[in-house]
Image: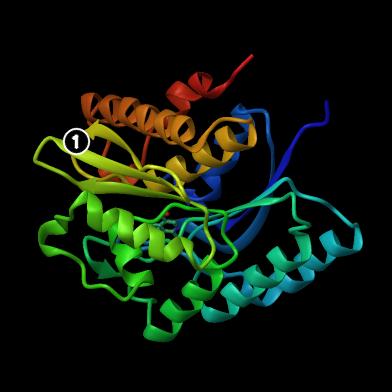
Amino acid sequence: MTQKKIALINDVTGFGRCSIAVMAPIVSAMKIQAVTIPTAILSTHTQFPIYYFDDYTPKMRDYIQTYKDLNLKFDAIATGFLGSEEQVDIVIDFIKNFNKGDTFVLVDPVMGDYGKLYKTYTPAMCNKMKELVRFAEILTPKLTELCTLLDIEYPDEGKVSLEKLESMCEKLSKKGPRHIVVTGIPFNKKQILNFIYNKGEDYQLIMSDKIGNDRSGTGDVISSIIAGMYMNGHSLYESAKKATTFVSKCIEYCERNKVPNYWGLCFEMFLRDLTEE
Ligand code: PXL
């Protein structure tokens, strides 16, 4: 059996456990080869008071050209935080080149949190992300991102009905993604809701306990587990379930060991849970 390959288009961040530093080991544990396509190199992620940031955009086209010349093929492409409109254009060009029909594309539209967009998300950048969404088979937005992609106001305290979530996903799926996992929706003081949408099917729900505060890179852990599980033949529900169970276990460990939130999830402790024989 030939091993599968996933192209990870994301930043390389040294300390803080996010992006490729998290996604590559996770998909590797799932026996999938990780191929890194860097968008930027940072010493730590941007939640730290200081960080070194080297934008890789001007070099990405030459980097990718070698893959085109080598006629490399990928079973999947996963994208995460993107810094500029130009970078999104490069990613769209990459998908157009390498998605030969049997490549699956996961887009994690990392745009904001709690109803607020990150500073780099100008209206033009939001429109660019809407373009990218058209190329996704699986989309893993948070509620903030789902609302932004549909130009809908973020609901008060993130409270939203299941019917509304379904209609939002239906609307977004008309633009491209057949599968949508809306992650980390505030449900009540103790629980978080994850909403699973498969086009043409009934929605499914996964509840997880809310333990402690949010941790950096959680979205990257979730999206890479979903991508890896899905590539290994599991349903979207099973993939999302695996991701949420794994994240809960990591958070519980981090809380017990008083690991600061900005240090991300201690996923290394449980990587073996992801390996299937
Ligand atoms: O997915 C989280 C993330 C990724 N990359 C960078 C970040 C963050 C979160 O802050 O700063 C550079």
Residue found farthest to the bottom? 124
Rendered-image quadrant of the N terminus = top right
Q: Is residue 48 visible?
A: no
Q: Residue at x 30, y 62 (%)?
A: 49
Give the side of residue 134 with respect to residue 263, left or right: right
Percent of width and height locating residue 32: 68, 34
Q: Residue at x 25, y 32 (%)?
A: 208
Q: Secondary structure at mark 1?
A: loop
Q: Quadrant of ligand 1?
A: bottom left
Percent of width and height locating residue 234: 56, 30
Q: Quadrant of residue 127?
A: bottom left
Rendered-image quadrant of the C terminus = top right
* Above or below, 28 relative to 41: above
Q: Which residue is mark 1?
A: 210
Q: Nearer the viewer, residue 128 or 37?
A: 128
Q: Nearer the viewer, residue 33 or 103?
A: 103
Residue found farthest to the right? 70
Q: Quadrant of residue 211?
A: top left
Give the side of residue 173 with respect to residue 156, left or right: right
Q: Does ligand 1 reach within 8 Å of label 1's beta carbon?
A: no
Give the side of residue 3 with respect to residue 242, left or right: right
Percent of width and height locating residue 151: 31, 76
Q: Residue at x 39, y 65 (%)?
A: 171
Q: Residue at x 40, y 30 (%)?
A: 241
Q: Nearer the viewer, residue 235 or 87?
A: 235
Q: Amino acid at mark 1?
A: Lys
* Above or below, 160 relative to 227: below
**Residue density around tag 1, few if under 14, some if 14–19, many if 20 or more, within 10 Å:** some
